[in-house]
Image (cartoon, rainbow, N blue to C red):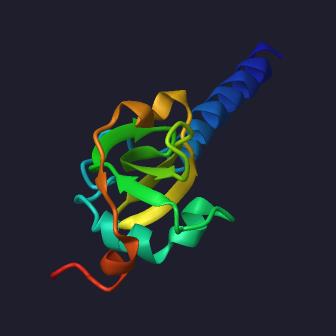
Amino acid sequence: MLVRALAIVSTLCSALLLGGCAVSGLLPDWMSTDVAGPEPAYRFIIANKLRDVLGDAAPSDKLEISGAARIDSLKGASWRVCLKAQKFPLLPRYYAIFFQRGQMVDTRLSVLIDQCELQGYAPFDWQTEMNNPPAR
């Protein structure tokens, strides 16, 4: 009886340990330098996907863009770029755009942890950038 109980406990422990190995493939690789990839050609990508970023907001607003910053997020290492859309002087809207391996993977209205309000911005002429693909 004792031998059978020990065998069951041993089998359960083995299953739990091996189950953890199967789950580890689903988690992001936080330490790899390859997760975020090189700095993306974010100006060109954002200009061509501006409707995805702004939604129904008019792209005719005055737009400004920040530089790319490498950050760690829940989805692993990413590049974050902030976009500032301003129609009226006192009411800017900030958007956070995230890239991994040269692809836009997420976009949202900026929240406190994005710190988009603290970034430095440069004018963003999206119509010019749309027709200016990155050099390879």
Q: How many marks?
A: 0
Where is residue 114? Give x, y as percent: 46, 35
Check the image and name the residue furthest to the left: 136
* In this picture, residue 18 sits left or right of residue 62: right
Return the residue found at the far top.
2
Residue 55 drawn at (x, y percent): 65, 63
- For this orientation, the residue located farthest to the bottom is 131
Instruction: State whether residue 123 is above or below residue 31.
Output: below
- Identify which residue is drawn at 49% across, 28% down: 113
User: Viewer-proximal residue, 59 or 135?
Assistant: 59
| In-image side of 93 versus 56 (left or right) | left
- Quadrant of residue 64 in the image? bottom left
Compared to 3, does 55 lie above or below? Answer: below
Which of the two residues, 4 or 57, is positioned nearer the viewer here?
57
Q: Please report the residue visible at 28 percent of the width from the left and 68 percent of the height from the top.
A: 41
Please state, as top left, top right, bottom left or bottom right, where the N terminus lies in the image. Answer: top right
Looking at the rendered image, the quarter that the C terminus falls into is bottom left
Q: Position of residue 110 (x, y in %)?
A: 54, 40
> x, y percentage for residue 125?
34, 69
From the viewer's perspective, tell me whether residue 111 is left or right of residue 70. Answer: right
Name the residue located 55 percent from the left edge and 47 percent from the top edge.
88
